[in-house]
Image: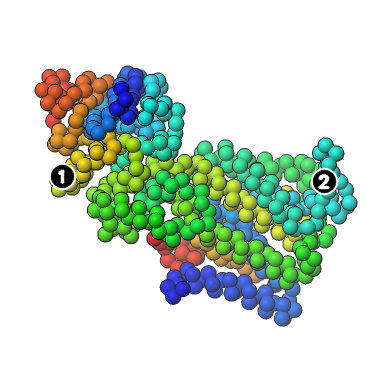
Amino acid sequence: MANLTIEHKLNIFLVLLLLVLPAIALILDEPFYITLATKVVILALAGVGLNLALGLGGLGSFGHAAFFGIGGYIAGILASHSLNAELMFSVLGVEFDGTTNMLLIWPLALLVSALVAVFIGYFSLRTKGVYFIMITLAFAQMIYYFAIAWPAYGGEDGLSIYVRNQFLGLNTLDPIIFYGICFSLLMSVLLLVWRLKNSHFGSALQAARQNEQRLAAVGIPPFGIKLTAFVISAMITALAGALFADLNRFVSPDMLSWHTSGEIMIFVILGGVGRLFGPVVGAGLFILFEYFLGGLTEHWALFLGIVLLAVVLFARGGLVGLIAGEVKHD
Amino acid sequence: MTDCILKISNLQKRFGSLKATDDLSLDLRVGEIHAVIGPNGAGKSTLIKQICGELAPDSGSIEFLGRQITDLDVAARARLGLGRTFQVSSLAMEYSALRNVMLAVQSVQGSSFRFFKSLSADQPLRDSAMHCLSEVGLEHRADICAAQLSHGERRQLEIAVVLALQPKAFLLDEPMAGMGAEGSQKLTGFLDQLRQRAPILMVEHDMDAVFSLADRISVLVYGKIIMTGTVDQVRSDARVREAYLGEE
């Protein structure tokens, strides 16, 4: 491990930061900052999902709010049925109840988002560039309006989760414990994405971004590779959505709106498209802006916009690229 | 015919009122180099695109190794063993030369849906990719990113990639284009040997290369093959002189 690149060092630094800052907040008895850090971690996870599609595969999905929201609604719907002791639905006499167990909620969020992503991806991936952006946006907006029009789960008003969902008997309402859960998930997913990036599949996926014609000419179908990446990407973002619902103990159609898609994309672009820790940096910066600058002026988004513009114009590799230099493939 | 690897029958392709491919039939046999020549705009590129699957013909059929491939996509045809190179090099530009070849090797292995095993730790895969690079004399440039290779080196890399596919037939779209005198000569020698491995169907402008390499030549004019024959037959044919050689 002697030859660590600048990017490796930066990544290690970021992990330490995510460990140390909440610990300091805990010692100073400032639970609010732990919650703020939790928000960074969850939004970063959503960005990590999009980064897999956008950064590695070049798939500029402007509809990832769909998956973020689906994760959120799965958590919210299951919890509301369980807390109200209502039956969810029954199939052929088998009754399905809700649940407040995260270990059941997460797999279900992954499953449902994967199915939706297969459907959306199957149609969207036939298009490229601006058309792909528009069609993913259209699908996400369809789901958004569906959520608004569905009164059973709060419609436009959203759905409250009165008590945070359960995880192995831990007190998830304790901010530092919930932070620990979210942080562990983010680290696990980052590990997974890192392995995936350097795998045979990752190589094919990044080749699809560079030159689809080349990929097809060696006999690897670009469509299958991209669809697989799109689905994995959606599942990661849905997992983040489920956590986000638990963080706020509230789900609303806002999670599904195009604003959310845009924000997730901003995390990725700010931090560095295709960089493993890019979304962590991006989400961190976004929350810093929103909280600290937002405290000073309600026009904080203007300053974020200027930073985003500067990054797009002068630092195509995002902030990670600015610090660690360009990507080098072996 | 049993030794016929690739058989194209009655292929038609129109772009509006232009007949780019006009009832075209040709075949490729074991051990041969079959060159397709023709003036600019004769429909050579259109033909290559239809054979490799980038463009669907309006009618007609393409048979490869005794199998109908007319409805298969590019990747499926490549997996069956149709190895093509591009007129203008088409590579993964951010990847090193070696990594470009590795992509072909992993395709042959069918390992593109391996999600966790590290690619760079896959030594057998690296070794076979390196072997293909050394066959075209590019092993000393293995770690150089494709975007930084010279034009000639990219052409060599394309050949290395197609070798890695271990194809049953080579489909070469102007392999000599922009190679320079020395490069062309080297490549000509290389292709001369290559036909032992699998037959070659090539479209080429470089007449020296075509006449020294080809076992058979088809002359394409306005989407039609006006004749197919040996080098001597083509050279002495009056129609060919008129349509093509006379213009040079």
Residue that extends furthest to the right in the rendered view of this protein? A85
- Would residue A22 be found to the left or right of residue A216 on screen? right
Give the quadrant of residue B141.
bottom left
Q: Amino acid at mark 1?
A: Gln
The residue tagged 2 is A96
Calculate the distance from the C-alpha at mark 2 to the C-alpha at mark 1: 74 Å
Q: Chain of mark 2?
A: A
Q: Looking at the picture, does residue A70 appear above or below residue A90? A: below
- Would residue B118 be found to the left or right of residue A299 on screen? left
Question: For the residue carrying disc 1, how many other residues have a C-alpha within 10 Å: few (<14), some (14-19), or many (20+)?
Answer: some
Query: For the point 80% across and 57% down, which residue is it?
Result: A100
In the rendered image, residue B38, in percent from the top left (x then y), is placed at 22, 28
In the rendered image, residue B27, in percent from the top left (x then y), is placed at 29, 25
Q: Looking at the picture, does residue A317 appear above or below residue A123? A: below
- Would residue A77 be found to the left or right of residue A20 on screen? right
User: Residue B185 bears which disc, if any?
Assistant: 1
Query: For the point 27% across and 47% down, which residue is it?
Result: B155
Q: Secondary structure at mark 1?
A: helix
Q: Can residue A60 be seen in the rendering of this structure?
A: no
